[in-house]
Image: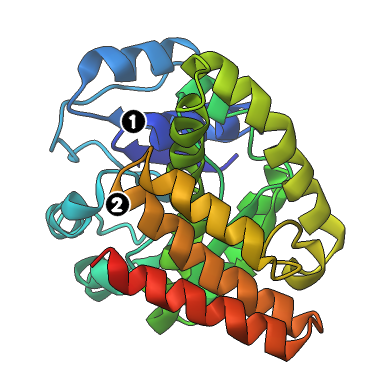
């Protein structure tokens, strides 16, 4: 039975602890500054793990250690842990933007080091522990740690892929655009729809089926083929009406979002074979509108 300690028991760390325990891993230690939260996670695991206070790594002898703290704390934890890791464990962090290089103190101490990052939104540890199935995990690090990470991901019913260490921040930027930025974009759409006189909940309910249908299209089509609406057909008249309505209802920030995505949509439309002259005329209108709001 593989033994595991987790340092930082927030949403990701808690979800990982619960999920691994269900797969037969022995969770030995949950180290956290929030003792109450760690205790609640520990109470759901059998046999119950120890819950040392923040910074107490003296009792850790697990084969596998996960550092699931905030990104800004990973290097500090690695440095402090290095003096307690003489047994040469495998050490992962779960940051999306940091590479395994941030664990250099542990690598120098004889540990196998790497990162493992699930591409899933975790807002609650208990719900998150059930969401790893089918999820893609980005793994990188030393060859031995990558091999172990791939085995762990498979046991969680996930999918793993590897990237070069130097690309970790770029990978994470793409992930943020596909989740965090999409959420912000959808919020702007909800706000705009509410300006039509709908209450916020109704505005959300009206748009969610449309959003879901767009995501479903992307499951089987390229982005260019999945594009629909005004910019898929370079409809200048509709664009003019949109712009006039937006200027009277929403902030310049939302108008800029609309225009930036309009430009990208026209690129997709052109890729999809739409008449270049029509695309060019509308692209010029978008550029002029951008200048007007700056």
Nearest the viewer among 275 and 5 is 275
**Left or right of 136 in this view: 163:** left
Which residue is under mark 1? Answer: 10
Residue 189 place in picture, x, y as percent: 51, 39
- The residue carrying mark 2 is 252
Q: Secondary structure at mark 1?
A: loop
The answer, for residue 127, to whether it is visible in the render is: yes
**Disc 1 vs disc 2: Cβ atoms closer than 8 Å?**
no
Q: Secondary structure at mark 2?
A: helix
Disc 1 residue crowd, few under 14, some 14–19, many 20+, Cα 10 Å = many
Q: Nearer the viewer, residue 241 or 167?
A: 241
The vertical placement of 195 against 187, above or below, is: above
The C terminus is located in which quarter? Answer: bottom left
x then y, percent, for residue 86: 25, 59
Looking at the rendered structure, which numbered label has been put on residue 36?
none
Image quadrant holding the N terminus, namely: top right
In the rendered image of this protein, does residue 147 appear above or below residue 3? below
């Amino acid at each position: 039975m593989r033994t595991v300690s987790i340092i930082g028991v927030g949403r990701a760390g808690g979800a990982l602890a619960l999920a691994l325990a269900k797969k037969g891993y022995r969770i030995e230690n949950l180290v956290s500054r929030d003792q109450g939260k760690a205790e609640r996670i520990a109470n759901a695991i059998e046999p119950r793990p120890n819950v040392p206070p923040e910074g107490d790594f003296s009792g850790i002898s697990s084969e596998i250690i996960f550092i699931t703290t905030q990104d800004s704390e990973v290097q500090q934890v690695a440095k402090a842990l290095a003096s307690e890791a003489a047994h040469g464990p495998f050490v992962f962090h779960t940051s999306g933007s940091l590479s395994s290089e941030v664990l250099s103190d542990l690598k120098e101490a004889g540990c196998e080091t790497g990162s493992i990052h699930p591409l899933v939104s975790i807002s609650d540890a208990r719900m998150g522990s059930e969401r790893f199935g089918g999820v893609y995990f980005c793994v990188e690090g030393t060859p031995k740690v990558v091999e172990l990470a791939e085995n762990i991901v498979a046991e969680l019913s996930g999918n793993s892929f590897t990237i070069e260490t130097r690309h970790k921040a770029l990978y994470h930027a793409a992930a943020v655009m596909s989740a965090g930025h999409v959420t912000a974009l959808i919020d702007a759409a909800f706000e705009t729809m509410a300006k039509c006189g709908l209450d916020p909940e109704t505005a959300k309910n009206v748009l969610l089926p449309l959003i879901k249908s767009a995501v479903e299209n992307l499951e089987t089509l390229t982005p260019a083929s999945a594009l629909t609406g005004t910019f898929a057909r370079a409809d200048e008249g509709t664009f003019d009406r949109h712009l006039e309505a937006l200027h009277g209802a929403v902030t310049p920030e939302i108008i800029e979002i609309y225009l930036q995505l309009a430009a990208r949509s026209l690129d997709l439309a052109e890729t999809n074979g739409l008449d270049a002259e029509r695309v060019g005329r509308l692209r010029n209108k978008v550029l002029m509108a951008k200048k007007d709001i700056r």
